[in-house]
Amino acid sequence: MLRRVALLLILLTALLSACAAPAAPQPSAPPAEEAAAPSQTPADTIVAAVPNEPSTWDYDFVQGDLVGLSMVKNVDPFLLDHPVVDSGNGYLTLDTTQLVGVYADSYTVSEDGLTWTITMKDGLTFPSGAAADAEAYRASKERGLNFQANVGFVFGTIGVPTTDHLTVDGNTITIQHDFFSSLQPYMHAIGSFFYAPATWAENGSTEDPWATDWKSKNPGSGGPYTVAEQVAGQRIVLEKNPNWPGEVMNERVEVQIVPSEANRVLMLRRGDIDIAFGLGRKDVLALESEPGIKVLSIPTTDAVMLVMNHSMPPFDNADFRKALAYAVPYEDILSAVYGGNATPMRSVMPNGMPGYTDEYFVYDTNLDMARELLAASGVTNPSIELTVEAGISEHSQIALLVQNALSQIGVTVTIQELDSTTIAEQRAQRGLPFLLHQGIAWINDPEYHFNLSLVPTGFLNFGDYNNERIAEIVAESSQIVDAAERFAAYAEAQEIAMDELPFIPLAQPNYVVAMRDNVQGYTYASDQVYRFWTMHK
């Protein structure tokens, strides 16, 4: 009982702390006594509320905008995808070990893995009547590789830097890779979207030959849906595309733009919408007992961690890093911050990623061990600054728990809250000594994860971590074709990293979403994109 009271007092301090500007208050769900009304939406329509309009309709440029990414995924065609399967837990998911054709009829991969040959289905067209064929796909990749944005990253990662690597013969496209990469299946799924080339020919200009300005404002077509109506700031209506070579489980989707989180909650309770996206965890979980509403709480590989910059003292001291790891109140974070809706993370790879092992996690909370290691480090009277992103209440709560725990071993922690733009800039420069970070890898694969976060050139290596053996393992494993053998190679990498601690793994929060209880076929994937075409009532 005393432990629970202490935790509540620590979290309550978040509202009074002068260490940073307070975050904006989160709206709460309406009182429970107002019973949820029956669903008011049409049986053949999915009505969803989202917090913002799509930032762009151009798949080549959409970044950091889940609504925008979801909308283009639902309206643009794609060659290949991972099959949708039943998770067995009340929702659908993707089997990322397999690829299936959508606009592609078949694909083959050469024995050395360097040549992919994709044959498209004959006779398919865009709603305009233009051919949705191999040349349309090649031209779309030429456009994307010209910018070196989304397509440039995806194809460059697997050794396809230019359109010289793509050749068309009838309705077959051959893709040559400069090197083998085990990430090829994932990247070909992510990068397989395409457009009708006539759209940029008709809407471009001398200054903008690829029609980037026009494309950012105008939706594509040929995917599961066609945009039937778009009213700025209000709604987007999607109509089922009868020519899409896949199954769409509803006739239309109405996406309502509702910036207010409180209003999205209220609309769901009144039955005005079928599903509400972008709600805070507390608001979603508060709806669990509401009649007519169901809540999905889905384990994820979304990793929350304390990043320590190995180039900055005192975090360049291994014993100091380990002292902090032994002092962290892991169980308190899981229970007090996430209410049990999270998975423990006990490695530098998230639980649920192939090859994950918790064998090398030895840092269960032990304040005596933490004090011993702090003394062994030789760091005296340490005072450190922990940076968190402003406005994320769960991160503020974790920071306070960490601050309190470290104070018990003699480490003074000051909490610094930075806005999202500033923290992103300083992270990219590897300029923050101690950082609370959260992120999920779109590709649930150790090679992808380590390349992002744990090799010197990693885009997300915010702690400037560098271990030559780990870099060797990543490079060597990329050439291993057998998946089981490749995943096993990462046991050694995890052992090394868990001893050196580039970051302290904390937790993997569940993905939570609330919907009406008659909605079926919700698909969860690690990209967290809304796949409307699998949903129905």
Image: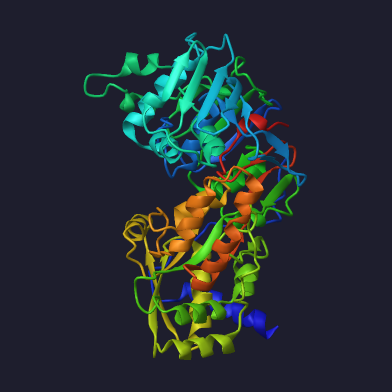
Residue 348 visible in this rendered orientation of the protein: no
In the picture, measured across the screen, residue 263 lies left or right of residue 197, that is right
The quarter in which the N terminus is drawn is: bottom right
Q: Residue furthest front?
A: 112
Observer-nearest of 33 and 436: 436
In the rendered image, is residue 204 in sight? yes
Image x and y of residue 326, in percent: 56, 80
Of 205 and 231, the residue lying toward us: 205
> Which residue is at 56% across, 12% downward?
124
Count up the numbered dots.
0
Residue 48 located left or right of residue 40: left
Colour scheme employed for the rendering of this structure? rainbow
> Which is more toward the observer, 102 or 34?
102
Q: Is residue 303 left or right of residue 270?
A: left
Q: Residue at x 41, y 59 (%)?
A: 461
Vertical relation: 150 (above or below) 512: above
Residue 536 in the image: state x and y as whole percent.
70, 31
Q: Write the residue at 51% across / 65% down.
A: 305
Residue furthest to the left in view is 207
Task: Please identify the quadrant where the C terminus is shown.
Answer: top right
* Percent coordinates x, y for residue 369 in the rendering: 57, 87
Q: Where in the figure is residue 426, as x and y percent of width and height? A: 32, 61
Q: Is residue 425 above or below residue 221?
A: below
Q: Nearer the viewer, residue 94 or 448?
A: 448
